[in-house]
Amino acid sequence: MTLWFTLIGGIVFSAGTGVALGAALGITGLVILQFYSNGATSLAIDAIWGVFNSFTLSAVPMFILLGEILLRSGISEKAYSAFSPLFRRVPGGLLHTNIAVCTLFGAVSGSSLSTAAAVGSVAYPEMAKRGYNKDMVVGSLAGGGTLGLLIPPSLSFLIYGALTETSIGRLFAAGIVPGLMVGAMFMAYILVRCIRNPSLAPRDPQSSTLWAIMLGLRQIWPLLALIAGVIGTIVLGLATPTEAAGVGVVLAVIISSIWGDLTFSKLIEAIYNSVLLFSAVGFLVLGATILAQSVSILGLPQKILEVVAQSGLGTYSVLLLVVLIYLIMGCFFDGLSLMIMTLPVVFPLLTGLGFDAIWIGVVITIVIEIGQVTPPVGLNLSVLTSLTNNQVSLGRVAYATVPYWLIHLFAILLLTAFPTLALFLPNLLF
């Protein structure tokens, strides 16, 4: 009991003092190692070296840089104009374009925040000018932005794979079908809402011929080439995630210079922001690694499994409890921080109950996606509020995103009932 009090109380107290979450996790882990395991702090140092010397983790800063380059290159604007004719006559119009471009941009950026910011900065002014319902606009952008974490290459999958020693290639393959499925459900929701209430999305009187649509879609070939260069090489086993990330950055610089408006100063800015972001993520990983080592040495996951076995709770009851805990904690922590902080306990618990490690990665990613659109910390909500120049309040954005929140929960239900949705493609390719 004293150990649990130290674990939970240490994290809450350290975080409550205002120190960085990585420091709160690390300090708590060091205290546990010092007083409960005869000062086995050298093991924590070895674990930190092992994680940061991991070839897999080195892909994270490269994918962050890739997303930053695309964010500053204006490519999202070209992709948006390319998709617009395709949905011009469909009820919902440009709302569907939001989801489609978020899906495409998510397939190269790996970040939910970057996806929401890049697409939202282009879409919101145009749609507000055309008289679209603002709540529907910001809801579709906030919800669509979450696809950046699920559609590979995903920072969530990279960090999950590095911390749990799970195949990144299999994780990337596992995210494709659920990501496309969630995007399709978003579009279905928009279609139904706009058929029932056409005033939400004014119909464009201008019609588009098949030739015009094909000409528009032809403009996105550079992004498709980038996706093929990154995802294709990983899934087909031609390159490791780190090698593919390096190729992706080079391709992104070339494509953004020719097709976009990337300049040397913007490239330097992208590198600078990438260093800051990875430093924040790296510090979290450091603290979580220390905590994971202390938890592992003391056998806490095994003790939790014993408690669960003795409690009589079923396997899916435990899964439901884990999801509920993530939903509650998602109100206070950003998605990646929450995942890194909880994996030391959640991963051995769920694998011990018989859940597949790849499947767990997909479900946890969907749950932390929900955190991206959950107030008060939901980062996608803050991004969309700032993009509207505070014309739409944080509360309104959060309310408008509730349907997408529920769709994510429904996706988890489908994946639980039909795990093959996530596991079919990795089993086929690997």
Image (cartoon, helix red, strand yellow):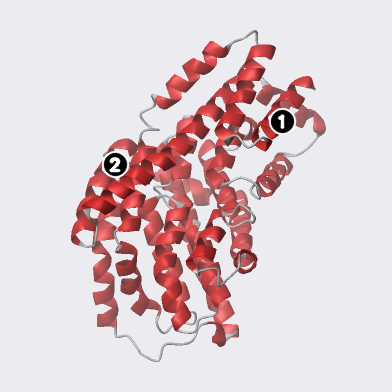
| Kind of residue at disc 2 | Ala
Kindly identify the residue that appears in the image at 54 percent across and 65 percent down: 385
Q: Mark 1 points at which residue?
A: 8
Residue 94 location in percent, x, y?
A: 44, 76
In the image, residue 130 above or below residue 357 = below
Residue that protrudes farthest toward the bottom in the picture:
205
Amino acid type, mark 1: Ile
| Left or right of residue 423: residue 36 | right
Q: In which quarter of the image is the C terminus?
A: top left
Give the tally of numbered discs: 2
Q: Is residue 360 above or below residue 128?
A: above
Q: What's the CA distance linking mark 1 and mark 2?
A: 39 Å
Front residue (pair 223, 23): 23
Identified at 61% across, 60% down, the residue is 405
Question: Residue at (30%, 63%) from the top-left corner?
Answer: 74
Task: Residue 20: give x, y in percent of width and height.
Answer: 57, 35
| Placement of 423 over or under 5, stated as above or below | below
Could you say which disc has been placed on residue 244 in the image? 2
Q: Nearer the viewer, residue 331 or 344?
A: 331
Q: Is residue 339 left or right of residue 170?
A: right
Instruction: Find numbered disc 1 in the image and state the secondary structure of the residue it sits on.
Output: helix
Q: What element carries label 2?
A: helix
- State the quadrant of the N terminus: top right
Q: Can you tell which of label 1 and label 2 is closer to the viewer?
A: 1
Q: Give the class, few, some or many, for how many residues have Cα within 10 Å of label 2's Cα (few <14, many ≥20).
A: many
Quarter of the image for residue 291 reads top right
Between discs 1 and 2, the one toward the N terminus: 1
In the rendered image, residue 188, in percent from the top left (x then y), is placed at: 53, 72
